[in-house]
Each structure stands twice: as C-alpha cells, then as structure tokens.
C-alpha cells in the first residue's frame, strides 16, 4: 500500500515510468493486489500502451471479478478501440456500484464514441477547425452570393442533421 501511494503521487506529477516502477515493486510482493493492477493498467494506458494495459486489466478482472473500478479501467482502456466493449465494461461497473459518477461519465463517453456523427461534430467544432472555417466565411461572404455563403455557413450543420436522421 505504501508503494501504491507513492506511485499515485508520481502519476499526479505525470511521471508515468516512475509510478509504474513503484507499482512493479508492489506487485512483486503481492501479484494479485487489485489496486496495484488497476493503477498499472492506468499508467500503461497513459503511456499509450493499450495492449499491455488491456492484458493487465483482463488478468485483474480474472482475479477480482467483483471490483467495479477494474471494470471502469477496462472501459477506459477499450474506449479508444472498441466503444461497444467499453459500454459493456462501464455497464458492469455501474451494476456493481451505481452511485459512482465517474462510471456514468465513462458510460456516456463510450456511447458518444460509438456514434460517428457525434465524433465528427466534436472534431468539427474544435478551435483549430472552427475558427479558420468560419473566419474565412466572414472574410469571403461579402464576395460571394448569399446562397453560397449560406451553404458554406450551414453546410456542416445540415450534414450533421441529415446524418443523425439517417442513423436514427
């Protein structure tokens, strides 16, 4: 537990490698410690090593099938690659602990990730996309016809509406 606390402190400082080294020492003394396994998966996920994190989470879930936080970590690990599996993991975490708000947030994020038009909407309205796009619209709208300016302004919004209707 002592090493786990120090690993958490290293994670708070974003020293992922140092935190993982401390957790490895903790797992050497108790290889089935649920929190150490979960934090190891979290650290690996933060480093982008999703396959390793998934392997650790599967091992931890086999040892501790009633740990809601492990299911949530499995959901966060799977959310980038398989939103449906992430929904299942967050659903199981919510079944085990329905009061935890972070599990609800994870479930919403997994549902959001499973819909491509929501991902497109999130991408389209990021500042580096939105500002140049609508900035150019403001500059060129006085030089083109009002119909073309309207299409340029409302085109992405109409596209999202049509996609949501077709996907419903």
Image (tube, rainbow, N blue to C red):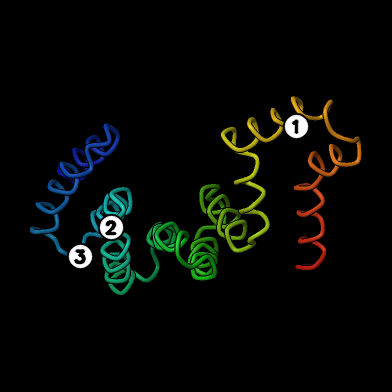
Task: Tell me if residue 5 comes above or below residue 56 in the rendering.
Answer: above
- Packing grade of label 2 (10 A; few <14, some 14-19, many >=20) is some
Q: Which residue is mark 2?
A: 49
Describe the element under mark 1 as helix, strand or loop.
helix
Q: Which residue is mark 3?
A: 32
> As drawn, which residue projects farthest toward the right?
146
Q: What is the CA distance from the residue labelled 1 to the residue labelled 3?
A: 58 Å
Q: What is the CA distance from the residue labelled 2 to the residue labelled 3?
A: 21 Å
Describe the element under mark 3 as helix, strand or loop.
loop
Task: Find residue 30 and report its image quarter.
Answer: bottom left
Q: Position of residue 2 (x, y in %)?
A: 16, 42
- Please indicate whether residue 147 sits to the left or right of residue 76 in the image: right
Q: Which residue is mark 1?
A: 137
- Please indicate whether residue 71 sits to the left or right of residue 52 in the image: right
Q: What is the CA distance from the residue labelled 1 to the residue labelled 2?
A: 41 Å
Nearest to the eye among marks 1 and 2: give it: 1
Describe the element under mark 2 as helix, strand or loop.
loop
Q: Earlier in the sequence, mark 1 or mark 3?
A: 3
């Amino acid at each position: 537990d002592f090493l786990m606390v120090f690993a958490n402190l290293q994670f708070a400082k974003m020293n992922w490698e140092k935190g993982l080294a401390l957790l490895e020492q903790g797992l050497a003394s108790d290889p089935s410690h649920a929190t150490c396994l979960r934090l190891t998966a979290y650290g690996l996920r933060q480093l982008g090593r999703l396959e390793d994190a998934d392997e650790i989470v599967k091992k931890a879930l086999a040892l501790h099938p009633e740990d809601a936080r492990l299911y949530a970590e499995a959901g966060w690990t799977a959310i980038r690659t398989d939103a449906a599996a992430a929904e299942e993991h967050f659903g199981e975490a919510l079944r085990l602990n329905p009061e935890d708000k972070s599990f609800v947030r994870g479930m919403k994020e997994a549902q959001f990730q499973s819909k491509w038009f929501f991902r497109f909407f999130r991408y389209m309205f990021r500042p580096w996309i939105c500002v140049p796009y609508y900035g150019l619209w403001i500059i060129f709208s006085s030089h083109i016809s009002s119909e073309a300016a309207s299409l340029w302004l409302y085109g992405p919004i109409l596209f999202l509406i049509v996609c949501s209707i077709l996907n419903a």
